[in-house]
Amino acid sequence: MIRGQGRRKSPRNTTLILDWLHIIIGVLVVAMAVIAFIDPENNMILFPVIFFLTAVLNTVNGVYRYRQSGRDKKKKALAIGLLTIAVFLLAMTVISGFSIWR
């Protein structure tokens, strides 16, 4: 291996990791949402966690799509849209966390 060259992940491995991340975070979000809506008063702490996990998922999707977009402006716009939603969800995490712990 030439010095300075790191080992790069193949697109297939990256896609597989992204798929597993979707599955794991999706299952966690659905489970927490069900638990939170069954008894919202005792499980209010789950709402900021749900917002945070969805923000993480949108951030990962946005970064992945941005890197894959190349020169395609529409794909870059979609990626930036996902990152904008992630920022909004992070703001919702902070707001809901602040309102619960205040």
Image (spheres, helix red, strand yellow):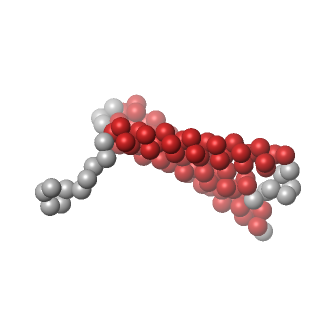
Q: Is residue 85 visible?
A: no
* Identity of the residue drawn at 47% across and 47% down: 60
The image quarter in which residue 31 lies: top right
The count of marks equals 0
| Left or right of 86, for residue 75 | left
Please state the horizontal and vertical placement of residue 50, each as a whole percent of the image: 67, 50
| Left or right of 91, for residue 61 | left
The image quarter in which residue 11 lies: top left
| Left or right of 36, for residue 7 | left
Residue sitting nearer the eye, 65 or 14: 14
* Identity of the residue drawn at 56% across and 41% down: 23
Please state the horizontal and vertical placement of residue 15, each as a whole percent of the image: 41, 39
Q: Residue furthest bottom?
A: 102
Q: Is residue 40 visible?
A: yes
Please state the horizontal and vertical placement of residue 55, each as a whole percent of the image: 57, 49
Q: Residue furthest left?
A: 2
* Identity of the residue drawn at 40% across and 31% down: 74
Quadrant for the N terminus, please. Answer: bottom left
Please state the horizontal and vertical placement of residue 21, each as a whole percent of the image: 52, 45
* Identity of the residue drawn at 78% across and 68% down: 102
